[in-house]
Amino acid sequence: MKDFIISTETNCDLSPAFIKENNICVIPHYYTVEEDVYGDGRELTNKEFYDKMREKHKVGTMASNPAVIDEMFTNIANEGKDILHISFSSALSGGCGNVQVVSNQIMEANPEMKIIVVDTLAASLGEAILIQKALDLKAQGKTIEETAEIINELVPHLITLFTVDDLDYLYRGGRLSKTTAIVGSLVNIKPILRINEEGKLVAYSKVRGRNKSIQTLAAMMEDYLGSYREKQLQIGIMHGDCEEDARALQKIIQDKYGYTDFFIEPIGPSIGAHSGPGTLGLVFLGDHR
C-alpha cells in the first residue's frame, strides 16, 4: 500500500506541536496587520494578534498562494507519496479551490500520484476533528481512498456553532449592517451563528449577555446530536483569546452530556481577523447541519 501524507492549512487551528508530531503538511494562509504581512515564517502569537485587534489596528487576510502549494506538494510527490488534503470550507475562502487546481496540475505531471481533496465545508477545529480521524484511520492501515471516503461521509454531520463578543467585527466583515451592530452592542446582544450544509456562515439566533450566549451554545447541542449522541469523535471548543470562557463551556458540556474528550485551541489570526477577540465556537457531530 502506497504511503500518503495528510495535509491541511493554517485555518485548522491545530497546535504546532500536534502538527509536527503527526507530520502534517500545512499550507499557509496569510494575514495582515496594517501594512505588515504574516503567515509564512513571520508570525504573531495569538495573544499579540488579538491585542492588535483590541487596539483597533486594521487587520485582513489572504488565501493560500498557488506557487507555495505547488512547491510543497511537488516535494511530497518527489518522495513518492500521495496526499489527502483536508480543507477549510470552499464557501469561506478560495484556498480549497487553489489546492484543487494545483493538485490537478501536479497529478498531470505525475500520473502515478494521487491527491484527494476533502472540502470539509467547515473551519478551525471542524477541520481538526476530521484530521484526527484521518490520522486514526491511517494508523489502522486504511488506504487513502478508504480514509477519504469515511471522512467525506462525516462532513454533513459536522456541526459548528459559535458566538462573538463584539458585533463590530462582523460588521467590518460584511456580516451585519452598521445600524444592527451599533444597536446590538448598546443592548448587549450576542449572536449565535452556525456553518450550514453549504459551508456558509449564517445567523441562527441571538441572546442578551455573554453568559447567556455560552449557556446557549451548550444547550443547542441537544437540537443536533440525535443518533450521534454516543458516536462523538471529539468535542472541539475554539476561542479568540478567551480560554476561561472556553473552559466554562467545556464544564457545562461535561456536566450536561458527560463528554470528556475535548479539543480546546485558540482561533488563529486567519479566522480571528473576521470574528474578533472573544469569539467562542463549538464543534461536534450530529444528525445533520
Image: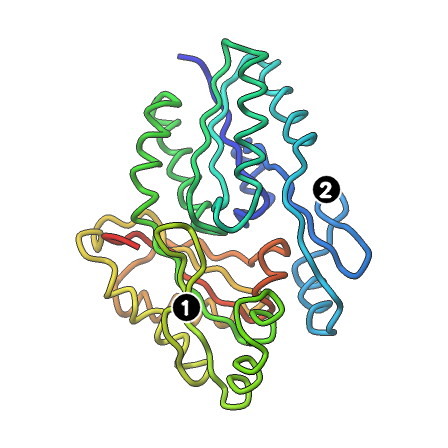
Quadrant (top left/top right/bottom left/bottom right) for the C terminus = bottom left
Residue found at the far bottom of this picture? 187
Residue at 74% across / 74% down in the picture? 55
Q: Residue furthest left?
A: 227
Question: Residue 144: where, in percent of width, then height?
Answer: 39, 23
State the image coordinates of residue 49 (x, y, percent, origin top left).
Answer: 70, 62
Q: From the viewer's perspective, tell me whether residue 282 is left or right of residue 48.
A: left
**Residue 154: image location, x then y, percent:** 31, 42
Q: Point out residue 226 in the picture as x, y percentages from the top left corner.
A: 19, 57
State the residue at coordinates (69%, 57%): 45
- Labelled disc at residue 203: 1
Between 173 and 189, the residue placed more toward the observer is 173
| Image label count | 2
The residue carrying mark 2 is 40
Task: Give left or right: position of 32 versus 216.
Answer: right
Query: Circle 1: is it few (<14), some (14-19), or many (20+) Cα within 10 Å?
Result: some
Distance CA(mark 1)–CA(mark 2): 32 Å
Q: Are marks 1 and 2 in contact (CB under 8 Å)?
A: no
The answer to which image quadrant residue 69 occupies is top right
Q: Is residue 237 above or below residue 208?
A: above
Task: Find numbered disc 2 in the image and state the secondary structure of the residue it sits on.
Answer: loop
- Above/below status of 267 relative to 38: below
Q: Which quadrant does the N terminus fall into?
A: top left
Colour mapping: rainbow
**Numbered circle sitting on residue 6:** none
Q: Is residue 123 above or below residue 22?
A: below
Task: Tell me which amino acid carries mark 1.
Answer: Ala
Apparent side of residue 11 relative to residue 196 in the rendered image (left or right): right
Crowd around label 2: few <14 · some 14–19 · many ≥20 (10 Å): few
Q: Amino acid at mark 2?
A: Asp
Which callout, 1 or 2, points at the residue further toward the start of the chain? Answer: 2
Where is residue 57, by image quadrant? bottom right
